[in-house]
Image (tube, rainbow, N blue to C red):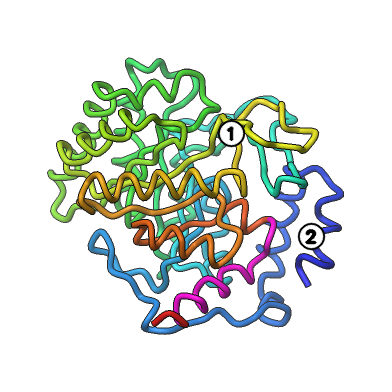
Amino acid sequence: MYKSLIRPILFKFDPEEVHHFTFSVLKNFGFLAKLFLPKPIEDKRLEREVFGLKFKNPVGLAAGFDKDAKLFNELSNLGFGFIEIGTLTPKPQAGNDKKRLFRLKEDSAIINRMGFNNGGVDEAIERLKKNKNVLIGGNIGKNKVTPNEEAVNDYKICFEKLFPFVDYFVVNVSSPNTPNLRELQDKKPLTELLSTLQNLNLQKPKQKPILLKIAPDLTDSQLLDIIDIVKETQIAGVIATNTTLSRENLVSENKSEMGGLSGKPLTKRSTEVIRFLSEKSGKAFPIIGVGGIHTAQDALEKLEAGASLVQLYTGFIYEGPKLINEINKTILQGK
């Protein structure tokens, strides 16, 4: 029903406006989902223990959808095993000028240049205080006005404030939409940033997993650096991958828009990165696979390549909530 009836209507309108409309519907009429959507699959065989955390199933929602932790309960009720909020920054910021979100329907993709628009970490915390049992990841970044040489302080602020309210952290240095942010992926600044956060973590009575989210545009040499950095800093793992700057083989009219590309064009590359990290590291750390998951088979390929968990974003928008059940059902069939 979603792809045949609901999606064609939603896709007639501006994607960012549709996003806000969908949030309003889910917030106010989320109870109707039980009437119109299949019941989420719950099965003990889907449970995963990763990073010392227990996930009720391996299919999560990637960061960027529920930036400000407004809808984690309602989204969890759709069947997600975990919800990643953010990217959150210390201070609220409006993000880049609109229009900044573009559908590429012929490519089953999205280009965004949102620019970490969010209400700030303090606002999100007020909502997270009401969380009862949803497993939450906190994706953190720096404010646009913060120079790279001071970026560590922004990440420290978010880490300290969010610590009591999230189950794991994601350090986002791979968004292409904040000027010069990706420079923090270079070995020296990235090692310094992750070491600083891990040192803060180790001072806590109970540590929480810290993950690094990386870009799909890294070279093999840079990916080998990532493996070294993860081992050196002893963070918990990696999320592979964020959006890409590549525009290879696109046909949609919006293909030349600036920003990060997500969706089907990213499927193959994100899986390649997962496989490379898993094999070259000797499976030394867990990986969350994200990028271009539009079918259950896409998810299985990432799990087979070395991912322990997967996340949806663009595939969720194009395929609808039933994709969550399809992935979990296919995983169970292989048991």
Which span of residues is magenta-colored? 318-332
Along the line of sight, which residue is nearer the eye, 203 or 314?
314
**Left or right, 81 with reference to 166:** right
Which amino acid type corresponds to the residue marked 1 in the rendered image?
Gly
Residue where numbered disc 2 is placed: 7
Name above or below for residue 174 compared with residue 63: above
Q: Residue at x 54, y 38 (%)?
A: 119
Alpha-carbon span between mark 2 and mark 1: 22 Å
Q: Position of residue 317 (x, y in %)?
A: 67, 56
Q: Position of residue 237 (x, y in %)?
A: 28, 48
Which amino acid type corresponds to the residue marked 2 in the rendered image?
Arg
Is residue 112 on the magenta stretch?
Answer: no
Residue 132 seen anywhere in this rendered image of the structure: no
Q: Quadrant of the C terminus?
A: bottom left
Q: Which mark is residue 260?
A: 1
Magenta-colored segment: predominant secondary structure = helix
- The answer to which quarter of the image holds residue 262 is top right
**Left or right, 233 with reference to 221:** left
Q: How many marks?
A: 2
Q: Position of residue 272 (x, y in %)?
A: 42, 46
Name above or below for residue 45 compared with residue 146: below
Marked residue nearer the N-terminal end (2 or 1): 2
Along the line of sight, which residue is nearer the eye, 85 or 291?
291
Name above or below for residue 230 compared with residue 153: below
> Could you classify mark 1 by the number of other residues whose Cα lies within 10 Å: few (under 14), some (14-19), or many (20 or more)?
many
Residue 140 seen anywhere in this rendered image of the structure: yes
- SS under mark 2: helix
Q: Residue at x 50, y 48 (%)?
A: 63
> Could you classify mark 2 by the number of other residues whose Cα lies within 10 Å: few (under 14), some (14-19), or many (20 or more)?
some
Q: Residue at x 60, y 29 (%)?
A: 95
Q: Quadrant of the N terminus?
A: bottom right
**Left or right, 181 with reference to 285:** right
